[in-house]
Image: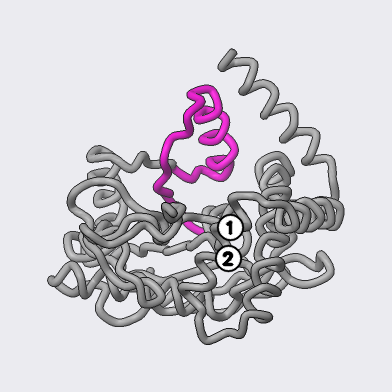
Amino acid sequence: MRKLKYYTIASLLRLTSMLSLRGAQKIGQFLGGLAWRLPTKSRRVTDINLDICLPELSGKERKALSFASMQHTGMTAMEIPLMWEWPVEKCLSLVRETRGLELVDQALASKKGLILLAPHLGNWELAGLYFSSQHEMAALYSPPNIPEFEEYMIKVRGRLGSELVRGDRRGLIRMMEILREGGVVGILPDQSPRGKTNVFAPFFGMDVRTMTLVAKLMQKTGANALVTYAERLPDAKGFRMVVEETAPGLTSPDPVVAATALNQTVEQVIRQSPRQYQWEYKRLRHRPPGEPDPYKEKQS
């Protein structure tokens, strides 16, 4: 049954990859809009996140942003098969504009290694592929539930030699080795992490569990950090690769200060393109002891 599930998913990915970028985005836009109109969990979580994180917007503005966000999430989902199955050169040709790439060159010139923080904003699969085409790179990942799919994922993401590193103790050691050698490591910084070594820090004003991994890697290796995302251009024109500096405080010995800086870094790029952020993710579910989970249904 598990292998059948894998082959079904793999077949759907290959079938979807036959689409053009415009075709994939149109279908994704439709599916995301449909999911918004129906009583889906994604719609509910999106609305809760926007109410908490962007209270300065009017109700009408948050409703419009909720709809646009789910459309963009649908587009991202439909673009992934393209990024995994298209020839690398065809994928990279979608990067039509860049901003801030000189920051990467400056950071690597220090020979101290570089951590690229890539939130769930825009097309993060393209961002990983783009930078692995420019530099020797490793990316942190969590293994999927289907073992056969993990092998496929490693293969397609490593087409340019990018090394995929599991998020465990051995993976941490490997990342430190890479950074000490002056290499590049990619990390998704906006996940709700597991484990006891993480801390609670504000994200859009709400204290949530936040990873301390980035600060630890920087402290132990002296590595630099930047934040990046592949912003979707209108009318299927491709993407703009954006690189920016992080908020101050990432290397603070105080883990809460460092985690707060990490969340501020993610916030600053989300605010630049809030429609393209994956608001459908339950980022706020892990709260300090005694604080309510905002996604749980209230008991009447």
Which of the labelled discs sits on residue 47, or is there none?
Answer: 2
Q: Is residue 56 above or below residue 104?
A: below
Residue drawn at x 53%, y 79% as measured from the top left: 271
**Front position in the image: 136 or 153:** 153
What residue span does the magenta drawing correspond to? 134-163
Q: Secondary structure at mark 2?
A: helix
Q: Is residue 166 above or below residue 90?
A: above
**Front position in the image: 117 or 103:** 117
Rounded to the nearest angstrom, the CA distance separating label 2 from label 1 is 5 Å
Name the image quarter holding residue 185.
bottom left
The residue where tag 1 is placed is 44
Q: Which quarter of the rendering shows the N terminus?
A: top right
Where residue 38 appears, x then y in whole percent? 73, 52
Name the residue type under label 1. Answer: Arg
On the rendered structure, is 44 left or right of 63? Answer: left
- Residue situated furthest left in the rendering: 253
Name the image quarter holding residue 16.
top right
Where residue 52 appears, x then y in whole percent? 46, 73
Where residue 61 appears, x then y in whole percent? 66, 81
Q: Is residue 156 above or below residue 249?
A: above
Which of the labelled discs sits on residue 283, or is there none?
Answer: none
Where residue 126 appears, x then y in whole percent? 62, 56
Residue drawn at x 46%, y 79% as measured from the top left: 268
Asked if residue 196 shows in the view, the reply is: yes
On the rendered structure, is 183 left or right of 168? Answer: right
Say if mark 2 contacts mark 1, CB within 8 Å.
yes
Residue 156 among magenta residues: yes
Q: Which quarter of the rendering shows the C terminus?
A: bottom left
Q: Secondary structure at mark 1?
A: helix
